[in-house]
Image: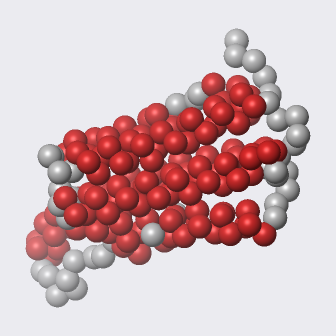
């Protein structure tokens, strides 16, 4: 997540003091893209962490599926930088959305592979938990694809859709009850 900051570039070092202040303020889209992507990566980190609460073992294929997930995560600094430089550009918004889509699908693949036929999870893991986590995870890629589609009409709609993913995934859900191993009071 900290690699995101490498996409933030300071203004030209030869600027005067008044010009420096205005240029720094003019970089607000970069700061916003950075903060947004930092939180998005936090959401993915928490989702990945929660999956590993249930994943009890590993195998070679699983490691490569997980590396695919990390590959998509590693691309986020580039798509964030692009979005910060061109915040309303259809191309930048689509690249960012494609990155979110790929990351969500890769996270889904991690869960799908681990839970298929209880491959890497306990044999008595409740199928409801498996399907609930699948449904929750797939929402990110679906909304991201919708965002890509809306970018052909208005990139602001796309950005709002991407933004709405954050509160959706931050809010506690039914899966959290199972994760804690308790019941909802």
Check the image and report above or below for 89 versus 12: above
Residue 14 left/right relative to 108: left
Q: Residue furthest right?
A: 123
Q: Give me the residue at 78% from left, 69% from top.
A: 60
Q: Is residue 160 visible?
A: yes
Q: Quadrant of the C terminus?
A: top right
Total residue callouts: 0
Residue 53 left/right relative to 163: right
**Nearer to us in this view, 146 or 78:** 146
Check the image and report above or below for 20 versus 119: below
Q: Residue furthest front?
A: 117
Q: Residue furthest bottom?
A: 14
Q: Give me the residue at 28% from left, 68% from top.
A: 82
Find residue 11 and report its horizontal and vertical position in percent.
22, 77
**Nearer to us in this view, 53 or 106:** 106
Find residue 144 and report its horizontal and vertical position in percent.
37, 48
Find residue 116 and report its horizontal and vertical position in percent.
74, 47
Find residue 160 and report its horizontal and vertical position in percent.
28, 41
Check the image and report above or below for 74 versus 131: below
Residue 79 left/right relative to 17: right
| Quadrant assignment, res 135 | top right
**Nearer to us in this view, 38 or 65:** 65
Residue 134 left/right relative to 18: right
Q: Give me the residue at 12% from left, 80% from top.
A: 16
Q: Is residue 31 visible?
A: no
């Amino acid at each position: 997540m900290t690699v995101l900051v490498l996409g933030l570039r300071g203004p030209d070092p030869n600027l005067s003091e008044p010009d420096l202040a205005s240029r720094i303020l003019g970089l607000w889209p970069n700061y916003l893209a950075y903060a947004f992507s930092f939180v998005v990566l936090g959401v993915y980190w928490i989702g990945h962490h929660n999956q590993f609460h249930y994943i009890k073992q590993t195998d070679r294929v699983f490691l490569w599926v997980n590396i695919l997930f990390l590959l998509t995560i590693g691309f986020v600094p580039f798509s964030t930088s692009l979005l910060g430089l061109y915040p309303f550009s259809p191309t930048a918004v689509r690249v960012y959305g494609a990155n979110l889509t790929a990351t969500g699908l890769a996270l889904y693949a991690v869960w799908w592979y681990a839970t298929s036929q209880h491959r890497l999870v306990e044999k008595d893991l409740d199928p409801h938990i498996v399907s609930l986590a699948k449904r929750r995870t797939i929402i990110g890629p679906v909304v991201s694809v919708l965002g890509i589609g809306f970018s052909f009409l208005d990139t602001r709609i796309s950005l709002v859709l991407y933004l709405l993913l954050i509160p959706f995934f931050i809010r506690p859900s039914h899966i959290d009850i199972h994760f804690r191993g308790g019941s909802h009071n």
